[in-house]
Image (spheres, rainbow, N blue to C red):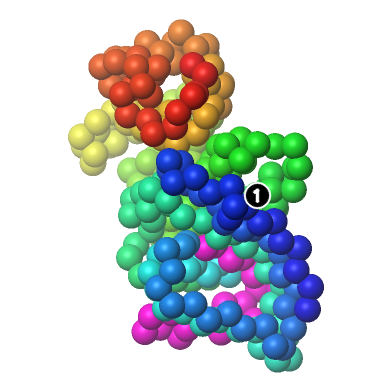
C-alpha cells in the first residue's frame, strides 16, 4: 500500500473557524482498515477506483468508484477495502465551527454516502493547495474553506436532484451561479421562458424576486468569506463578480446595514486580517 499524505495537525489553531488535519491520496491494498470511535473530526473521501465497506454508527455502506463517503464528528466508524478490488481514494480530514456550519446548513442529518457524485476536480485542487510548501497555514485554510463549500454545495445539489418544477429550476440556476455574474436574460435563455413569467412564478413560489434572492444569497456568501477566510474586501468582491469594490460595499451595506469591514470587525474570530 502507498499513501501521499499532507499533515497539518501541528499547525492547527483553536481560534480558526476551520482546521485541516490531513489530506492525501491512498492507494489501498487488501489489508487497508481504519477504526475510529467518537473523534472530533469530519472527512470527505472520494473513491477514484475500487470498492470497500464503511460501517458508521448503525449503517453498513459500500462505497465504490465515483462515490463520496462522509465521516462525521463523534461517529463510531470502521472502513476497509475489498480484497479483490481495493480502493484508490482522495481525502481530507478537518474540523471546526465552519465545518459544523456546512454540515448543518447543507447536508441532511446522517448522510454518510453520496453515490455517483464526481468531486475529483475539487479534491485534486485541495491536494494542490496542500502541496504548496511556501504557503502559510492561514492561506491554506482560506483556500480550502472555499473548496469545502463548493464540495458541500455539489453534494447538496446531487442529493436533491429530481424532476424540478420551473420555480425550482430557476432557483437552482441562481444557486449554482452565486459566485458568477448572472443576468436575468441568461436565465431566460437557459430555461426558455420569458422574463416576466420567470419573475412572476419565482415571486409567487418564494415570496421574493429572482434578482433580490440572488443578491441576498451572494451577500450571505460574502459574509461567510468575511468571517471564515483572510481574503481582503476587494478579493471577495472579485470572487463574487461584483463590478467593483465600491458596488460590493454599497450592496452589502444596503442588505446587512453595515459595511463589509465593519461586519468583519464585529463578528470575525480571525485576527490580524488586512482590510
Q: Where is residue 10 in the image (x, y as percent from the top left)?
A: 59, 52
Q: Could you tell whether 245 is left or right of 102 in the image?
A: right
- Looking at the rendering, in which quadrant would you find the N terminus? bottom right
Please state which of residues 177 and 10 is positioned toward the viewer in this rendering.
Answer: 10
Q: Give the range drawn in magenta.
A: 43-65
Q: Position of residue 155 (x, y in %)?
A: 48, 57
Q: Mark 1 points at which residue?
A: 126
Q: Could you tell whether 73 is left or right of 207 in the image?
A: right
The prevailing secondary structure element of the residues shown in magenta is strand
Q: Could you tell whether 210 is left or right of 52 in the image?
A: left
Please state which of residues 74 and 155 is positioned toward the viewer in this rendering.
Answer: 74
Picture residue at 53% right of the left edge, 81% below the top: 35
Q: Seen from this angle, which residue lies furthest right?
A: 2
Residue 184 against residue 144 in the figure, above or below: above
Q: Where is residue 269 in the image (x, y as percent from the top left)?
A: 39, 34
Rendered image quadrant of residue 140: top right
Residue 102 against residue 52 in the figure, above or below: above
Amino acid at each position: 500500500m502507498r499513501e501521499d499524505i499532507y499533515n497539518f495537525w501541528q499547525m492547527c489553531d483553536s481560534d480558526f473557524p476551520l482546521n485541516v488535519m490531513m489530506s492525501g491520496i491512498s492507494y489501498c491494498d487488501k489489508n487497508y482498515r481504519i477504526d475510529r470511535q467518537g473523534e472530533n473530526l469530519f472527512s470527505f473521501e472520494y473513491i477514484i477506483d475500487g470498492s470497500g465497506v464503511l460501517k458508521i454508527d448503525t449503517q453498513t455502506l459500500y462505497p465504490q468508484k465515483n462515490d463520496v463517503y462522509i465521516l462525521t464528528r463523534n461517529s463510531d466508524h470502521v472502513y476497509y477495502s475489498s480484497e479483490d478490488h481495493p480502493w484508490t481514494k482522495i481525502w481530507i480530514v478537518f474540523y471546526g465551527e465552519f465545518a459544523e456550519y456546512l454540515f448543518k446548513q447543507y447536508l441532511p442529518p446522517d448522510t454518510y454516502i453520496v453515490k455517483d457524485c464526481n468531486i475529483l476536480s475539487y479534491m485534486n485542487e485541495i491536494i494542490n493547495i496542500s502541496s504548496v510548501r511556501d504557503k502559510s497555514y492561514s492561506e491554506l485554510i482560506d483556500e480550502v474553506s472555499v473548496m469545502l463549500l463548493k464540495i458541500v454545495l455539489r453534494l447538496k445539489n446531487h442529493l436533491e436532484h429530481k424532476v424540478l418544477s420551473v420555480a425550482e429550476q430557476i432557483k437552482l440556476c441562481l444557486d449554482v451561479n452565486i459566485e458568477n455574474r448572472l443576468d436575468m436574460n441568461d436565465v431566460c435563455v437557459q430555461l426558455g421562458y420569458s422574463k416576466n413569467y420567470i419573475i412572476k412564478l419565482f415571486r409567487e413560489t418564494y415570496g421574493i424576486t429572482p434578482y433580490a434572492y440572488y443578491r441576498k444569497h451572494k451577500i450571505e456568501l460574502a459574509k461567510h468569506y468575511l468571517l471564515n477566510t483572510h481574503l481582503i474586501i476587494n478579493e471577495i468582491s472579485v470572487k463574487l463578480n461584483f463590478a467593483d469594490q465600491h458596488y460590493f460595499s454599497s450592496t452589502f451595506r444596503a442588505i446587512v446595514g453595515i459595511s463589509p469591514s465593519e461586519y468583519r470587525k464585529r463578528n470575525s474570530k480571525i485576527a490580524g486580517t488586512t482590510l
